[in-house]
Amino acid sequence: MATAEWTKLTLEGRSADVPLLSAVLSMLDEGLLIEDLSDLTADSPYGEVLSEELASADRETARVSVFLPADRSLAEATAFVRERLREGGLTATLTVDGIREEDWAENWKRYYHPIPFGRLTVVPAWEEYTPREGELILRMDPGTAFGTATHETTHMMIELLDEEIRGGEHVLDVGCGSGILALAARLLGAESAAAYDLDPEAVRVAKKNIADAGLSGVVAEVSDLLSAVPHREGGYDLMAANIVSDILLRLAPAAPPYLKRGGLLAVSGILSARADEVREGIAAAGFTFLREKREGDWVAMLFGRA
């Protein structure tokens, strides 16, 4: 029997943040390794067997690790974690197998291959690929931004775009990461796509991907959700947001004025355990639930603006 290969991804931060760091990594996989000595003292049940080295260890710092199959995209996983840390206001050091990011940043590319989505296929920018007749090709280099199409949340969002875009739509992508959803929407026939992200590095990557794609009608700028997004006369036809549940619930009440009547809101990044909460919260903001997709532990949903 072949031996499975795993990659260890670790967050090191304050012991007090262990529950939050654990929550972030559990979005990747449920099997966590937690190294936290904050509760170990000489008076603890294990105090008598603590070695001198352990007894003098740092009680303020802890590490939380998750083990991912080697065929998972490290770029996607680490970008996903960085975004969730930023959204949660958490400070932590991220390492992969104890190796500095610059040493492994190129290695993940061997696991990133063309991924078909109905009319559209996402292809790594560095890989040669001959399209079939009529096949739409989106070449992507995500850099350190979230969005290679290998993560379940992105899978489902591209599928929703493929199903809903008929041609001529104006699309708004909130929390755009690499810009993959805005570019996909434009290739699928949207007349325009505007992409926004709080992270300037994500916007830089998105702008590069837009330039490399040679597509007009696609822009990327910095914004904390909708705070710096100008209203479009007549409203957008579709708003896409692939972020986490808490941020989706914060986004929803501000979203209706940006959408035309009958416009669509496509959301993803929702863990199954919170699906009901998010569905009800977005409905309470003035949207009608239309349908959902599920893949693994993740849920994507489509809503309509009444």
Image (spheres, rainbow, N blue to C red):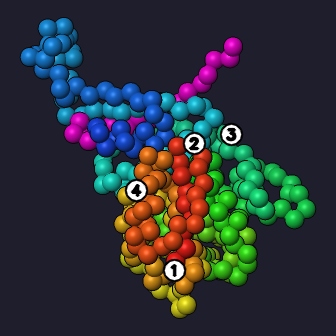
Residue placed under numbered mark 3 in the picture? 110
Residue 62 image label: none
Q: Is residue 24 above or below residue 222?
A: above
Name the kind of residue labelled 3 in the image. Arg
Mark 1: few/some/many CA within 10 Å (<14, 14-19, 20+): few
Toward the bottom, the furthest residue is: 233
Q: Secondary structure at mark 1?
A: loop
Question: What is the x, y in percent for residue 177?
Answer: 52, 60
Mark closer to the chain start, 4 or 2: 4
Answer left or right for 92 relative to 207. left
Q: Quadrant of residue 228?
A: bottom left
Name the kind of residue labelled 4 in the image. Glu
Residue 306 image label: 1
Answer whether residue 5 is magenta in the image: yes
Answer left or right for 219 relative to 14. right
Residue at screen point 48% across, 81% down: 258
Mark closer to the chain start, 3 or 1: 3
Mark 3: few/some/many CA within 10 Å (<14, 14-19, 20+): few
Mark closer to the chain start, 1 or 2: 2
Q: Secondary structure at mark 2?
A: loop
Residue at screen point 66% across, 66% down: 161
